[in-house]
Amino acid sequence: MNRFVAGTIILILCYLSVCNLSAASPEIEKARQYGARGQVTLRITDSTGKPVENALMSVAFFPSDSYADTDVRAGQTDTNGCFCIEGKTVGDLTFSITKSNHYATTGKYWFYRKEENCLLNNRWQPWNPTNTVVLKEHRNPLPMYAKNVDAFIPTQDTPSGFDLEFGDWVAPYGKGKKADLLIIYHAKIEDILNFSNQLVIACNNKLDGLQRARKEIESSLLSTYEAPIDGYQQQMVLTINRTKHTIIMHEEIGDKEYLIFRTRTVLDEKGNIVSAQYGKIYGPIEYGRADENHSAIRFTYYFNPTANDRNLEFDPSRNLFGQTDKQRVYQP
Amino acid sequence: MKTIILHPFIARQVFLYPLLFGAMVGFAPMIQAEITNYYPFNRHIRPVAIEASSPLSAVSIRRGAQELTGIVGPFPVITNTVECVLQTGLAWQQPDPLSAWVAATGSQTRGVISTNQIQNEVGWMSGIRTNSDRWGAFHWFLQNRIVFQTPTQTVWYSPQGVSNEIVRVLVGSLGDFEPGEICDSQSPAPPPLLPHTCLTTQTFFRADFNAYLRLVETRWVLPHVQDADTDCIPDFADGFNIDGIAGNSDDKTPGDFFPALNILLPPIEDPGTFLFRIVYTASDPLDVILPTPGSDFQPGPGALRLWLKSAQALRNGLPFTLGGDYLPPGTYSAQELGLTPDSFEWTIYLEMIRSGAGDSIRIDWSTDGGTRWRSMERINLCMIKMDMVPDWNHDRTINDADQNKATTNNPFRFWINDDNDVGDIAEDDSDQPGHWNWGTSPADYSNDGIDGRCDLLDFFPIWLDLNQALTLLPPSRTVQYKLSQSNSAVRAVYTDLSKDQAGSFLISAGKTYGPLFNQNSYEAGTFEITRSGTLLSNDFLDKIRNNANKGILLMEGSGPTTSPLVLEIWKDGSVIFKKEMPLCIDDIEKMYRWINLRPSGGQPTSTNEPVNNPDSLSNGKNVFFMHGFNVTAESARGWNAEIFKRLYQSGSQSRFWGMTWEGDIGMLNALHYQENAANALSVASNFNAQLHDITGETIILAHSLGNMVVSGAIQDYSLSVNKYFMLDAAVATESYDPTAFNITTRDNYMLHSAWADYNSNTWCSTWFKLFSSPDDRIKLTWQDRFPSVLSVAYNFYSSGDEVFEVYPGTPSPFSGGIIPFHLERHAWQKQEMFKGRGGPGGTDWAGWGFAGHWEGDDWVHNYTMADANIASDDTLRTNAVFWQEPMTMFSSNISAQAANDIIARGVPALSYAAGVQNILLPDLNRNYNANDHKPNGWGRSAAPYNDRWLHSDLRDMAYFYTHDLFEQIVTKGELQ
């Protein structure tokens, strides 16, 4: 190795050692700070893979991290559902897609990828990749019983039944008739950072159950279209158990998750499901002390009134509970 | 049965041509006159002729109705016995006139000359004559005697089926009786004794036996609670010198008006024994409660008053029996009331105070000392409901709780709409109060429409309670309804809202606004309320007439005023009814207090009671708002104004304190975040001192870096706070919840990538763990910095906050436009990440910088990574791996101020900002993710933000979208 090369290497190493940034190449770090050109083709399909033509696209490039420099473009997808866009960015772009009879979708595309060779001649690489984005279509949005529940839990340490069709606790605590969910709340609170809260959500009948899923947060239809046939568990236990300095256990249904439930299951003599009803509960499911004498729970659920119909797609304009300002469920 | 001998006291004497009896030499001629007397009372009851047009119009019917006297008839009496009695007598050769008269009347013959027939010309012809000292007299006297019964019905039904009770029966010239009363009338009475001189007299009477029914009268009245002479004394307390001080405002009420009651009197024979009994629910004028600080004039109990003088006269509030002019309920003689047998009618004046059960006036009369009472007059009083009611308690519903609250001394108060809202999202200085009505950013009131959803916050609803008035007096060419305001200081918007949804324009979409009720609320047209009066549209009035709950106008203030809003009904060019709503519109900043924590500049501290929002209207609680980073003194005005408005429109009735502090240090202050964070901890002391002597509950709202001030005040200076709302808190979560302190090296986005392979014990952020008390270096951490806060805190955060957005790695340094500096993505993360790293937005204090030294031209770290990872705690205490500045950090004795500076500028947090995530607490309601609470969708959807709830959206985004957050604050804070 000649002295020039060795010296260059040393300089580079020194530069890296004093550089404010990571061990990525200087060009990449410069591009991350001052932007580089990038081009991507966003190919929009519906949930079946069919291209979506004439979808309205709004795309934002970030020539710097300054919001004032944000470069927003608009356009429509072509007959192949494609929208090709180029701009200068420090590493990502964001987009939103809308079209009638489809659920709006937002997303982000990363040009910059850590520890990858993602820049060439001040252009993000690969150049003009095709990135497929799903724009969910309206399939069959249904009227459902949808409610934002924000209620006291009637008892502590013993099950309280909740009727999803009625939207209320079952007697003697409310006017509900069938306990679709059994809610059991346990709490031991020493002080504000030393406590143990536990919420058990259980189902009543054999083969009733719950299953956890991740929200498809890019889409305004956060859930899947249809409840699965299998995979339900009889109960789910949510826990916050902590001290001031330690989280002993934290199991939650957070804002990126939801539950799918099956309830009112009727079996034949062979144990096959004859009838069942389905629905979903969007996270976060929140619970805890409401005041000195009460605990409370907060969740949003959707109950399909039709037996054996696994459709989870809700039409917000046809809430079977009606609509009031406070109770309106606007999320499909 | 009653026998009535009625004297022709009021019979008109006429002189007729000489009679046949006696000589007539040298006598004064007799005058021929028409026989028009009615006996015994000269009372002529005639029907009222109303011009009838064909077809009858509403106007002609109403005009005719005004002519009605409440007397219907005639009806025949039921005669039992009718006979006519003639008495004649003649005397002559008497020594004197008395003897002659006595002889003529004493020896007269008397007999019934007819029965079943009423003689029309009864009366007498009498005379005394003399000749040669001898006297003669003649007397001819014809008298009707009738035993009759008045009509027996007690209720009269009009042809339209409307029923009215009958008060009394007026039988023509005979007198007043009760329904079904049996009377024996012999009339006229015998003539009086003639004088002792030559005289011939002749008097004839015609009887009117028709019966007329006096019906119970219904009067429509307005409560007397205005201020006719605008002397700040309500009319029910004005005009009779209630304060006992002569010569001041309450002596007279020019311009005031009492409805007059003209009582048709029965015949009064003997004023001394004719008794009146007056019954009504009285409100004694001298029971008026004079105002005290915090309370207004209040009338005494009771529904109404009767006066003997009109409203504009100088009156005395004492009962008339004590020399005053007030007519209280009671029993009085006609003589006491100043009435005589000549009195046909008696005028008294009615002052309605309030509506009560069975409001009526009853007047009875008796001629036997009170043994038997007859009904003279009954008047049922109906309050004309004509009112303007604001949403006094701003709970978005107009109901009983808002009625009668706006008074002269306690008007409805609101602000001038002089900011410059546009659309759904505030921009630049649009929320600053005090825009002019011209220029490139004019005040909103100068536009002729609502300026977007942001502008809806600056309107208040009033309800025009006009359904009853409109039913009685529908608008027409001659009947008009007008609103006026003497300073033209308000503008209005027509709506189709009902009073129970009066405030729904703030939070619900609707296209029922504007003159045609087809505009969206946020773009509806406004119209001026002029000084001379603005005619209300018939379309709007029709809605009220068809639905009593309609009649909501949205109002905005377009200038300062203390004059009332006036609602008038005009008829035939004159005001017939008027109602005022006291009003006070002024600058928004006159509705709250102000604390300036800056060392210089900005509006001065003002802790006196706000001029346009007295403390008497508050619930006694105090709510303080602390703005965040990079807010100038001038911008703070917009922040405070906007937060006040949003709390107000969410129902808060707490005393609001706007604040400003120096969170904009540095010429390019956005690059000096850490310095401002340090200053926040310093300002906490002054903040605590300012609140120290304020009484009442303390509720604090703080936004962004303002939370550093408040948290510091609570923790370091023991500020006593009832509730503390952290809004988008720019404070590391670990400051409140120690478990958020993240020392993992994998996927830890608060760990600078240059330190990724260094053990956590080498980091600046964990260096404090190497020490124990009393060494002050144990304090050099954000972890558990504010342990006292959580017991009172509510964490209102947004998972969509762009300032707190976390880059999944080490973000690039600040790179945006320097002049002017714009907000950057991942800004909060960057300012933590570049502590110790230098460069724009970074610091050269400790942090993620490496301790090192120059070797020639090379900067060399003091430790290699390997050496650092095996260094002992003792070594790391005295020779830190991180950049060893400032020197004050490396002492066991560090002042509180210095420690604050060190952590603000030199100790990176290892957790995200509390403003972007929840804190694990046992209480359900202590965390609120604003990003999940958009009941009306969002006013922004396009890239780059899409529909995220951003850092300042609690102010910038129209209240229509963000109202749930403020309602939560008001509810949880119990600010209402």
Image (spheres, coloured by chain):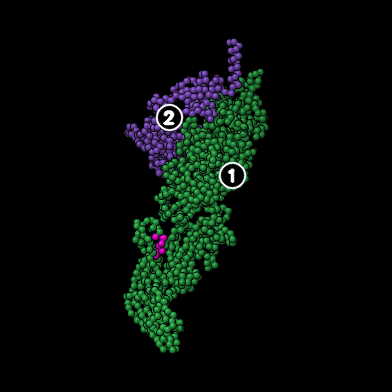
Q: Which residues are magenta?
A: B64-71
| Front residue of B625 and B874 | B625
Dot 1, crowdedness within 10 Å: few (<14), some or many (≥20)? Answer: many
Q: Which residue is mark 2?
A: A56
Above or below: residue B559 compared with residue B780: below
The residue indicated by pointer 1 is B593
Dot 1 and dot 2 residues touching (CB under 8 Å): no
Q: Position of residue B594 (x, y in %)?
A: 59, 43
- Supply the letter of whichever chain is green: B
Q: Is residue B68 magenta-colored?
A: yes
Instruction: Please indicate whether residue B226 sits to the left or right of residue B150 in the image.
Output: right
Report x, y in % for residue A144.
38, 37
Q: Could one spot residue B894 in this view of the protein?
A: yes
Residue B299 visible (yes or no):
no
Residue drawn at (55%, 22%) of the image: A30
The amino acid sitting under disc 1 is Arg
**Residue B70 falls in which quadrant of the image?**
bottom left
Chain letter for purple? Answer: A
Q: Which residue is outermost to the front?
A: B26
**Picture residue at 40% right of the left edge, 28% below the top:** A54
Q: Write the residue at 42% across / 26% down.
A: A77
Specify whether A91 is left or right of B681.
left
